[in-house]
Image (cartoon, coloured by chain):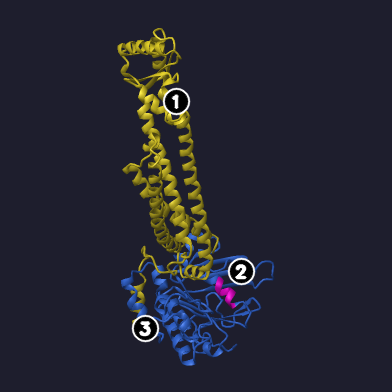
Amino acid sequence: MSQPDAEIVQFDNVGLRYGTDKEILTDVSFTLYPGCFYFLTGASGAGKTSLLKLLYLSQRPSRGLIRLFGTDAITLPRERLPGFRRRIGVVFQDFRLVDHLSAFDNVALPLRVAGVSERDIARPVGEMLDWVGLGDRQHARPATLSGGEQQRVAIARAVIARPDMLVADEPTGNVDPEMALKLLRLFESLNRLGTTVVVATHDVHLIRKVPESLIMRLDKGRLSDPTGALRYPPRRPGMAPGAGTQSTL
Amino acid sequence: MGLLSSLFERWRAPAAASDPRLLPEGQFAGPMPWVIAIMISLTVVAAASGLALRNAAETASADLEGGVTVQIVTAAPSERVRQAAAVLAVLHKAPEVAEARQVAQEELNTLVEPWLGTRPGDDVEALPIPALIDVRLKGAATPDRVAHLRALVVPAASAARVDAQAGWLAPVFSAIGTLQWLAGGLIALLALATMAAVLLASRNALGNHRETIEIVHMLGGTDRQIARVFQRSMAFDAAAGGLAGLLLGVVTIAALSRQFAGLGSGMVAGAVLHWQDWLVIAAIPLAGVALAVLTARMTVLAALRRML
């Protein structure tokens, strides 16, 4: 169990390579704390998606140490992975909706996987779809939804079970500015409820919409710390006035 | 915020044993039910054959258990008659003998007719056929008892030969035993073939749904939840195939029964199926479903363990 103020994620000299290729991530070390809002920026190919994959336990690192929720994720037995994954909501860059399921069933999937009874699923899923503006598309299959609609379904699915940590890979890439702002407010609401939010994006305007956010920047697989997100103690909302001024952006 | 908060608090219920609709139903479909139907029908026919043979052997064995045959092998008709009478007299006094009767000449003629011809004018009675005495002992015709009987009979009739009736059919019982093992082996091979077919179908279905499985894994789905979906789908396919296979097998058994009944052979008449045998045959599709589901589960779990 993690302590209230203990780190939720800790990376220590983490490296990642596929096969014998050169490292995609090199000596990545950082700490994420509960209740913080993080942006992960960097150019395309900098390793953002790879870093997020390590965060949501889709990939094991080639080297280094990773602790998640106070537990060593490297030596975590495979049987315990589902329990950890249920604490992490993920918005995939390519949405990864299940084709044969309706929008409703896609959003309900994390609840069903967690064993929530059907009786307790209908209302929250309906309300969540209303929240993302898809209340009238509940029965639509992903193939019949636009890119933006699919993205909103993916976001609804990621947040429906109120994860301890939300990891979103370019979550507003396919929606109009108005919906992007609305989704960002949803993330902020979650964040205020205690969920740690990590959003990978290269949209500077989006980052500026959350002035209290902390920023991590990846450059060719190496992490820099323009706003002190990686410091200990980190520059956190309410702790350091003017934190995350984002002047380096 | 308030709405979200209240929503989230209600939804974070502890995991229960629900069975989410993670994958499309009927993912095996295709030829799987037909493959299982063929396997089950062949298994039903093999099992029915094995059981019928066992019953035939048991019936014959029970009939022959206390049976002993005494032959008076001499070409002289008068001597044959004399020695037969002497043997009957000895046997009627022996305490272990329950019944002893000489087989009538008409019965002997009937027995040899198929081999010696039945055309008008044939005189089978002119042949030196041994006199036969059918003996029923009070217990089983063990080698010791037969030897004791021989010791009683031979002094009274030097041409007498004493044999346990079961001894005549020993090669037949041996052949039936071999056929029963063959039926068992066939059933084992069919079970293995079914498992192989299910294994291939499961791997194929896993490949087709790999992306969905990865998503379910990322959402915290467990291997058992995913395996349960495959098991359920396989259970439906196997149940449909099993039922069709059972019907096909029963029709085949009925047709074979009619054919063999037409032979009119005494041994074949004992090759019937009792109600207990029908229960065993009815259980074959259930065993097939269990085997298919278990194989699917083990295949899927083994494949999922190779994924992160």
Q: What element carries label 1?
A: helix
Nearest-to-viewer mark from 1 and 2? 1
Q: Which chain carries label 3?
A: B
Toward the viewer: B131 or A43?
B131
Q: Is residue A83 above or below residue A235?
A: above
The secondary structure type at the circle numbered 3 is loop
> Quick check: do tags 1 and 2 share a chain?
no
Mark 3 and mark 1: span between their CA atoms? 94 Å
Label the blue chain with its letter. Answer: A
Nearer to me, B124 or A38: B124
* Residue A220 in view of the camera: yes
Which shade is chain B? yellow
Q: What residue type is labelled 3?
A: Met
Q: What element carries label 2?
A: strand
Q: Which amino acid does label 1 sit on?
A: Trp
Q: Is residue A43 above or below residue B289?
A: below
* Location of mark 3 (residue): B1
Residue A76 is at least partly visible in this image: no
What is the magenta range?
A: A48-53
Q: Nearer the viewer, residue B71 or B6?
A: B71
B62 with respect to B197 (left or right)? left
3 and 1 marks on the same chain: yes
Name the foreground residue: A184 vs B221: B221
- Residue B50 lies, in percent from the top left, at 43, 41
Which circle marks residue B12 in the picture? none
Expressed as whole percent of the image width and height from the top left, the position of residue B275 reads 31, 43
Q: Which amino acid does label 2 sit on?
A: Val
Q: How far apart are marks 1 and 2 (CA)?
A: 83 Å
